[in-house]
Image (tube, rainbow, N blue to C red):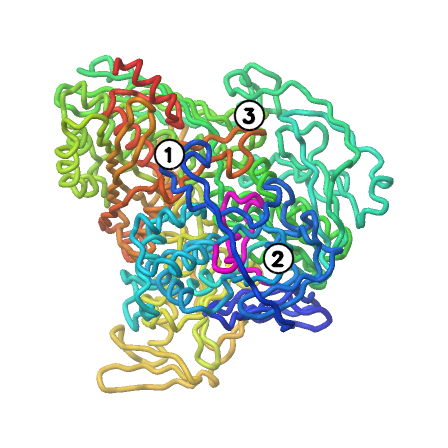
C-alpha cells in the first residue's frame, strides 16, 4: 500500500483528496498534514464520463510512418508511430493553455463506454479535453507533437495521438483511454506487472493502449509484430524488451503474490506497479483549484543582454495575474546542487548566459490563453563562447573563475611517464562526445500552494530535500517553511536532481498568495535543463610484453556549460574511474570542467564515467591487438582482484569484474565463431566499474519504520523512485530485516514533511546507502520487539489487530500495542536509523578511498555494419553485471536493459544541438526497433558493506555499452570512430581512413 499526501480540499482542515482508481490503480491518497488546503481540480473515474448523454461512433484512423520517418534511421520500428486523427499542428501548444481550448460549443463523444458532452473549441486537442475537462489524467502528454506516443488513445479501436487529434474529429465516436476496463487491458496490465514492463510509468498508458489495439486484431503477436506495433511509443527507462515480452504473454490475469517470507532475492512485483499501469499521477496531473498558470520567458540566444519593457500595458486584457523578474526574488538568486559552487539564478539578470535561460515569469488566470506572444523584451545578442578550448582563452562567465575553469580533478599514482617509456606496447588516442539530452518522457511539471505559512510544492524530482533547501534559499525562507511533495517521476536520469520550476512556482505562490501550476513544453524542457557533458579526452596506455598494463596518461576537457551544476562531481569522478576496473600501476589523469555559453551540463547516468570508458575501452582493444592477445583475455589478465590497489590507492575488496568477464567468455567464443568470415559482422566487449554514492563526501540516508496502535507497519521511505524500483527494493530490505512479509508494509513518502532524508536518487546509491539504513531500521525494530517479548533472534513476529505476536518454538506471546506509550511520531513502536558510507577524502594527488562500495560489469555486442551505407544493425547484447546480491532480479534486469538502450543512443544517434534538436523528432532516442535482444547475466560477488551484500547498479549498466559498440564496429570494419555519435557518415569516413 502506498500513501502520498494530496492537495487537501479547500476550506477543510486536514482534508485529503482520494486518487484511488476503482479500475485498478494503487491508492495514492494519504492523510493530510493539517492546515488549510485547496480542492483538486478535475476528477478521476473508472469506465467513462460522469455524463450520460448518448452518442455513437463510426470509423477510425491510424497511420504510421515508414522507414526513415524519424530522421532517417533504418529499422527503428517507426511504422508503428500513430498519426493524429485530423492533424493538429505538431509544434503548437505546450500543454496547459494550448491553442483552441474553451469557447466552443458542446461536443458529444463516448469515452470508455459512457457518453458525455464537453464544451470545447472544435480544434482543441483531444489530450487536453481528456485531461483538463474530463479529468482523465492517465493520458499523458510528453511532446504535443506526435513524437513520443505517450498520449495514445483508441478512437474506434485504432490508436491515435490525442495531442494531434482535434476533439471535433471524435464527435460521435468511441474514445478509449487507459482508465477503461476491458479484458485486453486487464490482461495487459497483469502481464506488465509480471514482466516488470513499467518502470517510471509515464509511457505505460501509451504502450498499453497501443498494445490493446494490436491484441484486438492479433491476439497472439510475435515479438517482431509487437515491436513493430509499439514503435510509435517512446520509452526512456525500460529498453523495451520487457514491454515486448509482456505484450507477447497475455495468457491470463495472474500476478505473483508477494512472498510471505525472505523477500530479498525474490522477483517481487513492483509494489507501486498497479498505479503505473493505471496511469499514475505525475507532476502535471494534480492541479489545485483556481491555480494560476505560470509561463517562463526564456532567452532565445546563447548569450544576450536584455531589457524588459512596459509589461503592464501588454498584460491588459490577457488575464495576467502578475509578472515577476529577478528583482522580485526575496532571497539569494543562486542555486546549485553543490552549495559552494551555487551560481545559477532562478531568473537571470542581464545578460542571459545560455539559450533557454529563464528571465521572467508570467502568471495567468485559469482559463486565460497563457501566451507570451508580444511580451515586451529587447534582446541584444553578445558574442558566445561555445567551445571549451576557446572559452579557456575567452572572457570569463563568472567572477573568480579565470580561464572559465570551474574545477580540475586529478589522480596521480606512481610515475606514468616513466612507466609508459619502458612499456613494450603503447597506444595513443582521442575521443570526443556531444551534449546528450536526458529525454525523459515527462517534461518538468508541478504545482505550488500555501498551507498556513508553509509553501508546498508538488513536482517531479530526484532530490526532495535538496529541492527544499535550494528553493528556501532562493525565496528567503527557512527550510522548514518549504515542503516538497514529489509526484510520480516520469524519468530523471540525473537532470531532475537540479531544481527547475520549484523556485519559480514557489515565487509566484509566495508573491500572490494563490496556488499555481507550471508545465514545461518539450522544447523548453530540452532547452533549459541539464545535459551530459561533452568531453574531449586524449591520452595513452601501455603494457608490457605479457600484456599487463603498465601505465596510463590522460587529459580531459569537459564542457560544463553556463553554470556549475554537477561539473565538480564529473571532473573529480572521471580521473578516479578512467583506468576502468583494471589494475594500473602508474596513472596520471586530469579532467577540467570549463564554462561555456552552452547548455548547463549536469548529472546524466554515470557523471562523466561513460565518456571516460569510451576512451579507455577503445584503446584497450588497440592495445590488446598490439600485444597479440585476445581482447577478452587481455581484460581478464588485467582485471582488478581483491587486495590490489585502485588508481587512488584504495585497496579493493569484493571485486566482481573477473567474474563478469568469465561469465561472458562462453558467449564471446560463440559470437566470435559465428562472426568469423562474415563480411560486416563484428563483436565487441567493454567493461565498467562505478563507485556507489558521493565521491569522498558525506552521503547519509535515514529510514524510519513505525507500528501504529492498530498493528500496521509503516515504512517512511524518502528515496525517490524514478523508475529504478527503490519503492520496492527498500521495502524488500526493510521487510527482510524486520522479519515480516513485504506486502504487510505501508509506504509513506517521499515527502519532506513526512519522511526522513534518504538522500538524492543518483550515483547508484539508493539500494546500497538507503538499503543499509532500511536494514538497520528493520533490525532495530525487530530487536525492540524481541526484547519486549523476551524472545530469541530466531523467533517469528507478526503485527495486526492491535497486537504484536511473537512465536518461538511452541510458545506464542501477544503484546497489546494500545498499552505501549506513543512516541513523537504517533507510533506505539518505531525505529529510525541512518547510514553514511565510510570513505577517505582524496588528497591533492587524488589518493584516498572515495567510495565504500563499487559495482562492476562487462557487456558484449554483436552487430553488422552495412559497408555501403555505414549503418549499424545491433544483433544481440549480452550483459554480465555484478550486483553483489540481486535484491530483486526482475528489477535488476530492467535496469540493465534500460541502461543499455541509453548507451545505444549515446553510441549511435544522440546529439543535442541547441536551437536545432529541441524536440523528440529531430533529437533521436532509441525505439523498439533499435534495441536488440538483451541477455542479462546476473553475477553476485557480495560486498560486506552492502545490505545483504548488495551493490548499486543504475549507472553501471550504461557505461560499457557505447565502447562495446565502437569496438564491435572496429572489429567488423577496421573503422575507429572517435567522435560520437557514430552516425553513418562518420562510420563511412572512419572506414575510408582504415582502408576498408
Q: CA distance from mark 1 to mark 3?
A: 37 Å
Kindly identify the residue that appears in the image at 40 percent across and 38 percent down.
606
Q: Which of the two discs, 1 and 2, sits closer to the camera?
A: 1
Q: CA distance from mark 1 to mark 2?
A: 47 Å
Residue 136 shown in magenta? yes
Q: CA distance from mark 3 to mark 2?
A: 33 Å
Residue 20 shown in magenta? no
Nearest to the observer: residue 696 or residue 118: 118
Q: Which mark is residue 74?
A: 1
Left or right side of 962 for 66? right
Mark 1: give few (<14), some (14-19) or many (20+) Cα within 10 Å.
some
Visible in this render: residue 609? no
- How far from the left and from the top, in percent, is residue 287? 65, 59
The C terminus lies in quadrant: top left
Mark 2: give few (<14), some (14-19) or many (20+) Cα within 10 Å.
many
The N terminus lies in quadrant: bottom left
Which residues, given as a range, are shown in magenta?
135-158
Helix, strand or loop for disc 2 = strand
Marks 1 & 3, CB-CB < 8 Å contact: no
Q: Which mark is residue 595?
A: 3
Helix, strand or loop for disc 3 = strand
Q: Quadrant of residue 640?
A: top left
Amino acid at each position: 500500500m502506498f500513501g502520498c499526501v494530496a492537495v487537501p480540499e479547500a476550506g477543510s482542515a486536514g482534508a485529503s483528496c482520494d486518487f484511488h482508481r476503482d479500475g485498478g490503480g494503487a491508492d495514492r491518497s494519504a492523510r493530510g498534514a493539517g492546515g488549510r488546503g485547496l480542492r483538486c481540480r478535475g476528477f478521476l473515474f473508472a469506465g467513462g464520463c460522469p455524463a450520460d448523454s448518448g452518442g455513437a461512433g463510426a470509423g477510425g484512423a491510424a497511420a504510421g510512418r515508414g522507414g526513415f520517418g524519424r530522421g532517417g534511421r533504418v529499422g527503428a520500428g517507426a511504422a508503428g508511430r500513430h498519426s493524429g486523427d485530423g492533424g493538429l499542428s505538431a509544434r503548437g501548444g505546450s500543454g496547459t493553455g494550448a491553442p483552441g481550448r474553451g469557447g466552443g460549443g458542446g461536443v458529444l463523444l463516448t469515452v470508455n463506454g459512457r457518453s458525455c458532452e464537453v464544451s470545447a473549441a472544435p480544434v482543441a486537442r483531444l489530450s487536453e479535453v481528456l485531461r483538463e475537462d474530463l479529468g482523465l489524467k492517465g493520458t499523458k502528454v510528453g511532446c504535443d507533437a506526435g513524437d513520443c506516443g505517450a498520449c495514445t488513445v483508441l478512437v474506434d479501436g485504432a490508436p491515435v495521438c490525442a495531442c494531434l487529434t482535434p476533439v471535433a474529429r471524435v464527435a460521435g465516436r468511441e474514445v478509449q483511454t487507459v482508465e477503461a476496463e476491458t479484458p485486453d487491458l486487464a490482461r495487459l496490465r497483469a502481464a506488465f506487472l509480471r514482466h516488470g514492463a513499467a518502470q517510471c510509468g509515464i509511457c505505460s498508458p501509451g504502450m498499453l493502449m497501443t498494445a490493446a489495439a494490436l491484441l484486438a486484431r492479433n491476439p497472439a503477436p510475435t515479438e517482431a509484430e509487437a515491436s513493430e506495433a509499439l514503435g510509435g511509443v517512446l520509452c526512456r527507462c525500460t529498453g523495451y524488451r520487457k514491454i515486448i515480452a509482456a505484450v507477447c504473454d497475455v495468457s491470463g490475469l495472474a500476478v505473483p503474490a508477494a512472498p510471505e517470507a525472505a523477500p530479498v532475492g525474490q522477483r517481487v512485483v513492483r509494489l507501486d506497479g498497479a498505479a503505473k499501469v493505471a496511469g499514475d499521477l505525475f507532476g502535471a496531473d494534480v492541479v489545485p483549484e483556481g491555480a494560476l498558470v505560470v509561463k517562463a520567458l526564456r532567452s532565445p540566444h546563447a548569450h544576450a543582454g536584455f531589457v524588459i519593457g512596459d509589461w503592464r500595458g501588454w498584460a491588459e486584457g490577457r488575464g495576467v495575474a502578475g509578472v515577476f523578474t529577478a528583482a522580485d526574488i526575496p532571497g539569494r538568486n543562486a542555486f546549485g546542487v553543490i552549495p559552494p559552487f551555487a551560481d545559477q539564478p532562478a531568473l537571470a539578470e542581464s545578460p542571459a548566459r545560455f539559450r533557454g535561460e529563464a528571465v521572467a515569469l508570467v502568471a495567468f488566470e485559469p482559463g486565460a490563453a497563457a501566451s507570451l506572444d508580444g511580451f515586451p523584451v529587447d534582446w541584444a545578442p553578445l558574442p558566445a563562447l561555445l567551445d571549451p578550448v576557446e572559452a579557456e582563452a575567452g572572457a570569463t562567465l563568472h567572477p573568480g573563475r579565470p580561464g572559465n575553469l570551474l574545477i580540475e580533478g586529478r589522480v596521480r599514482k606512481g610515475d606514468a611517464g616513466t612507466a609508459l617509456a619502458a612499456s613494450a606496447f603503447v597506444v595513443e588516442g582521442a575521443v570526443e562526445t556531444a551534449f546528450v539530452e536526458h529525454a525523459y518522457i515527462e517534461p518538468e511539471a508541478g504545482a505550488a500552494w500555501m498551507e498556513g505559512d508553509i509553501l508546498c510544492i508538488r513536482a517531479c524530482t530526484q532530490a526532495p530535500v535538496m529541492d527544499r533547501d535550494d528553493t528556501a534559499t532562493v525565496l528567503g525562507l527557512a527550510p522548514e517553511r518549504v515542503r516538497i511533495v514529489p509526484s510520480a517521476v516520469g524519468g530523471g536520469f540525473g537532470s531532475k536532481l537540479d531544481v527547475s520550476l520549484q523556485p519559480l512556482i514557489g515565487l509566484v505562490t509566495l508573491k500572490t498568495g494563490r496556488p499555481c501550476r507550471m508545465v514545461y513544453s518539450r522544447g523548453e524542457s530540452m532547452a533549459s535543463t541539464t545535459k551530459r557533458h561533452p568531453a574531449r579526452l586524449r591520452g595513452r596506455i601501455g603494457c608490457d610484453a605479457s600484456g599487463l598494463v603498465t601505465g596510463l596518461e590522460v587529459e580531459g576537457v569537459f564542457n560544463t556549460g553556463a553554470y556549475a551544476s554537477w561539473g565538480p562531481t564529473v571532473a573529480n569522478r572521471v580521473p578516479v574511474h578512467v583506468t576502468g576496473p583494471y589494475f594500473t600501476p602508474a596513472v596520471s589523469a586530469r579532467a577540467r570542467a570549463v564554462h561555456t555559453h552552452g547548455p548547463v551540463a549536469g548529472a546524466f547516468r554515470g557523471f562523466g564515467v561513460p565518456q571516460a570508458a569510451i576512451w579507455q575501452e577503445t584503446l584497450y582493444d588497440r592495445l590488446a591487438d598490439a600485444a597479440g592477445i585476445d581482447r577478452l583475455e587481455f581484460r581478464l589478465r588485467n582485471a582488478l582482484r581483491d587486495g590490489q590497489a585502485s588508481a587512488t590507492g584504495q585497496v579493493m575488496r569484493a571485486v566482481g569484474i573477473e567474474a563478469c568477464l568469465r561469465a561472458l567468455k562462453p558467449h564471446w567464443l560463440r559470437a566470435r565463431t559465428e562472426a568469423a568470415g562474415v563480411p560486416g559482422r563484428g563483436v565487441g566487449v567493454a567493461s565498467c566499474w562505478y563507485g556507489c554514492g558521493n565521491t569522498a563526501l558525506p552521503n547519509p540516508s535515514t529510514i524510519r519504520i513505525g507500528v501504529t496502535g492498530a498493528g500496521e507497519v509503516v515504512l517512511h521511505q524518502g528515496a525517490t523512485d524514478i523508475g529504478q524500483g527503490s519503492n520496492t527494493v527498500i521495502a524488500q530490505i526493510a521487510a527482510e530485516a524486520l522479519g515480516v512479509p513485504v506486502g504487510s508494509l505501508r509506504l509513506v513518502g517521499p515527502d519532506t514533511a513526512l519522511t526522513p532524508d534518504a538522500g538524492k536518487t543518483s550515483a547508484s546509491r539508493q539500494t546500497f546507502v538507503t538499503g543499509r539504513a532500511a536494514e538497520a531500521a528493520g533490525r532495530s525494530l525487530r530487536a525492540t520487539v524481541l526484547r519486549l517479548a523476551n524472545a530469541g533472534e530466531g523467533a517469528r513476529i507478526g503485527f495486526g489487530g492491535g497486537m504484536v505476536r511473537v512465536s518461538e518454538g511452541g510458545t506464542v506471546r501477544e503484546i497489546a500495542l494500545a498499552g505501549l506509550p506513543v512516541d513523537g511520531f504517533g507510533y506505539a513502536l518505531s525505529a529510525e536509523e541512518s547510514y553514511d558510507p565510510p570513505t577517505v577524502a582524496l588528497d591533492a594527488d587524488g589518493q584516498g578511498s572515495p567510495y565504500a562500495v563499487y559495482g562492476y560489469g562487462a557487456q558484449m555486442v554483436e552487430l553488422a555494419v552495412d559497408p555501403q551505407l555505414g549503418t549499424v544493425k545491433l544483433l544481440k547484447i549480452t550483459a554480465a553485471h555484478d550486483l553483489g546480491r540481486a535484491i530483486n532480479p526482475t528489477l535488476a534486469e530492467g535496469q540493465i536493459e534500460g541502461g543499455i538502450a541509453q548507451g545505444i543512443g549515446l553510441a549511435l544517434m544522440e546529439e543535442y544541438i541547441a536551437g536545432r534538436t529541441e524536440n523528440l523528432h529531430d533529437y533521436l532516442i532509441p525505439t523498439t526497433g533499435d534495441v536488440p535482444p538483451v541477455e542479462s547475466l546476473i553475477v553476485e560477488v557480495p560486498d560486506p558493506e552492502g545490505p545483504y551484500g548488495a551493490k548499486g547498479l543504475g549507472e553501471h549498466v550504461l557505461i560499457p555499452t557505447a565502447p562495446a559498440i565502437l569496438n564491435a564496429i572496429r572489429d567488423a570494419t577496421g573503422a575507429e570512430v572517435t567522435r560520437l555519435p557514430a552516425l553513418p557518415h562518420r562510420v563511412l569516413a572512419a572506414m575510408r581512413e582504415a582502408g576498408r
